[in-house]
Each structure stands twice: as C-alpha cells, then as structure tokens.
Image: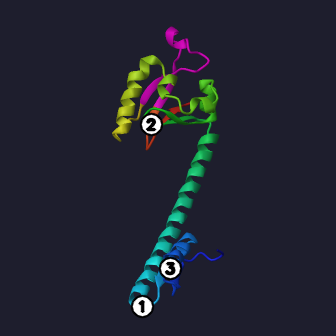
Amino acid sequence: RAVDVPVIMLTGDSSIDSAIMALRFGAFDFVRKPFDPVQFVLLVARAVAAHRDANQRRIRTSQVERIADIHRFLLERSSDIVVTIDPSGRVVFCNEPASRRLRCPIKEVVGTPVLSWIHPADHRRVASALVHLKSNRFCDGKVLRLVPAARPDACARGEANDAIALRDAATMNVLVPE
C-alpha cells in the first residue's frame, strides 16, 4: 500500500480463487506457473504503460481541477455580474453580485431557467442565443433586460431595463456590467 507500483501476482496455485483474491486486492494481473517468459515480459510492459498512463491522467486531472478552482475563485470574487447557463437554458452558476442584482439568494437562482430572469420582451432573443449555443455557433453581443425577483411586476410596467450581454463559450455566460 505504501508504494505506488503495478503488481503482477506470480503463483503456483492453480485455484481461480487465488486469482480473484489477487485482483480484489489491487493486482494488475496474475500469472500461473509455469509461464512463458516472453508473455510475462509483455505483461510487465503493459502494466508499466498502464501505470504511467494512470499517473498522467491523475496529473492532468489535478491540473484541470486547480485551474477550475482558480476560475471559480475569480468568478466568485469578481465585481462583475456573472451568471452561467447550460445549453438547456438552466442557470448553473451565479456569483454574489448577480445574486444581489437579481435580489435573490444564489441557491434560489441556480437550477432555474434563465428565462425566468429575463424580461419577456427578450425571451425570443434568449431562445435564439440558446439555439446558437446548442449548435456551437458564436452568439456574442445580445443585450437583454433583467427582471429582479423583488420586482416581478416590473415587466408589466416596462421597468425592467438592466442590460445583460450574452457571451458564448462551452457554456453561455450572462454578464451584466455594474
């Protein structure tokens, strides 16, 4: 357990239970005696390559997680209003300035349809932007009006006029300048 190396069990035991036990305890593979030395060398090479690949995946995953943590940190502490939506139009991220502008706690914004936060007059443009997002086409420069939760009747009076610019990425980011 202390050394991170692939283990190949070499045994004279012909019982299948021994092989199963070795694999359950983390062995890469097992070989029964008598064995072909050429096949054994190939098995060792395969085990080393698999171990190297697994280590490289762990390193890449760690790097991606570190970059994601940095981006999350920057988005959460940004003074810009940032709301990220998925291709289906649901909010997957909302930072604190966006929460304040929407007058609604973050946990109540995340998971909701973005259209519930957009002025009805702009729903068609948001729907169009979502179609572009789903087809991976660029949809920058859309200007929409925000409807804060504390002012649901503002739509009827035409008062909801905060601008929201949509930008396309792997997900769509809804940005509102302060």
Question: In the displayed structure, would residue 143 be above or below residue 169?
Answer: above
| Number of other residues with Cα within 10 Å of mark 3, as a class: few under 14, some 14 to 19, many 20 or more | few
Q: Secondary structure at mark 2?
A: strand
Marks 3/2: CA–CA distance: 62 Å
Image mark for residue 37: 1
> Can I make out residue 27 in this image?
no
Asked if the residues shown at circle 1 and circle 2 are in contact, with their CB atoms under 8 angstroms apart, the answer is no
Amino acid type at mark 1: Pro
> What secondary structure is found at the residue carrying circle 3?
loop
Q: Reply yes or no: does residue 111 show up in magenta.
A: no
Q: Does residue 50 appear left or right of residue 62 in this picture?
A: left
Q: Residue at x 42, y 37 (%)?
A: 87
Real-space Cα distance between discs 3 and 1? 21 Å
Image side of residue 129 versus residue 19, left or right: left
Mark 1 → mark 2, Cα distance in angstroms: 60 Å
Crowding at dot 2, Cα within 10 Å, few <14 / some 14-19 / many 20+, comes out as some
Residue denoted by label 3: 15
